[in-house]
Image: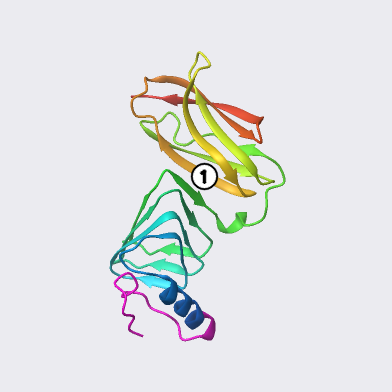
Amino acid sequence: MKIPNKYLKNCIYRQRRLFAWTFLLMLINFNPGIAQDDLVLQNMEISGTETFEAKNSITAGPNFVITGSGWVTFKAGNFITLKPGVAIVSGGQFFAITGKINAIPEQQTAIPKRFELKQNFPNPFNPFTTINYELPRAGKIQLVIYNALGQVVKTLLNNEQNAGYHSIRFDMVGLASGVYIYTLFHNGLKVKSRKMILLQ
């Protein structure tokens, strides 16, 4: 099936009703050259160089495959979400350009039973690191970084989020080496704090 759209030209669609219907919805809603607020990509196989852009969020999956010759870039203003069924074949390249990335592993599609703030990784780090956290309920989430004196040096999150498993990757460029504390808040209440070490 040939698709008259530069963003979808290398996609391969299985000939099933469900997949064909998904294709029609994407073709109608996607306007090349104009970034949408939210972009959903599913039932696609990318084998060339493609860039997908959205003002707010990009959601990939299920059944989103980047082949060994694929080179895909996501550019989103706020969030990138990778659902179960996203696959990158050996040799394929994937780049995400945004401050906030939600990755949903296969075994973690259920709602968490309790709040959890994981240890950042890598740790020590320079300058990038990732923090995973779990929310059993939706609410206003804040993720704040403090220095050893208890002063706020960075606010990573300050918005409403749904229940689920979340992840954020960030950098500490411009800050001195040392021990920092990161704290998760839910609706203004402290959930948990952990230490991390920045080595410049």
Question: Is residue 68 shown above or below 123?
Answer: below
- Residue where numbered disc 1 is placed: 167
- State which region is magenta: 1-18
Q: Position of residue 106 (x, y in %)?
A: 57, 59
- Corner quadrant of residue 99: top left
Q: Position of residue 23 (x, y in %)?
A: 45, 78
Q: Secondary structure at mark 1?
A: strand
Question: Is residue 70 shown above or below 110?
Answer: below
Image point (49%, 80%), residue name: 19
Question: Is residue 165 shown above or below 59?
Answer: above
Taking depth in this image into account, of 20 and 56 the one nearest to the observer is: 56
Image point (62%, 57%), residue name: 109
Question: Which quadrant is the N terminus positioned in?
Answer: bottom left
Q: Position of residue 93 (x, y in %)?
A: 32, 58
Taking depth in this image into account, of 145 and 131 the one nearest to the observer is: 145
- Residue 161 is left or right of residue 26, and the answer is right
Residue 17 is inside the magenta segment: yes
Taking depth in this image into account, of 117 and 100 the one nearest to the observer is: 100
Q: Position of residue 178 (x, y in %)?
A: 42, 19
From the image, give the main secondary structure of the stretch colored magenta.
Answer: loop
Q: Indicate the amino acid at tag 1.
A: Ser
Q: Residue furthest top?
A: 149
Label 1: how many residues lie within 10 Å, few (<14), some (14-19) or many (20+)? Answer: some
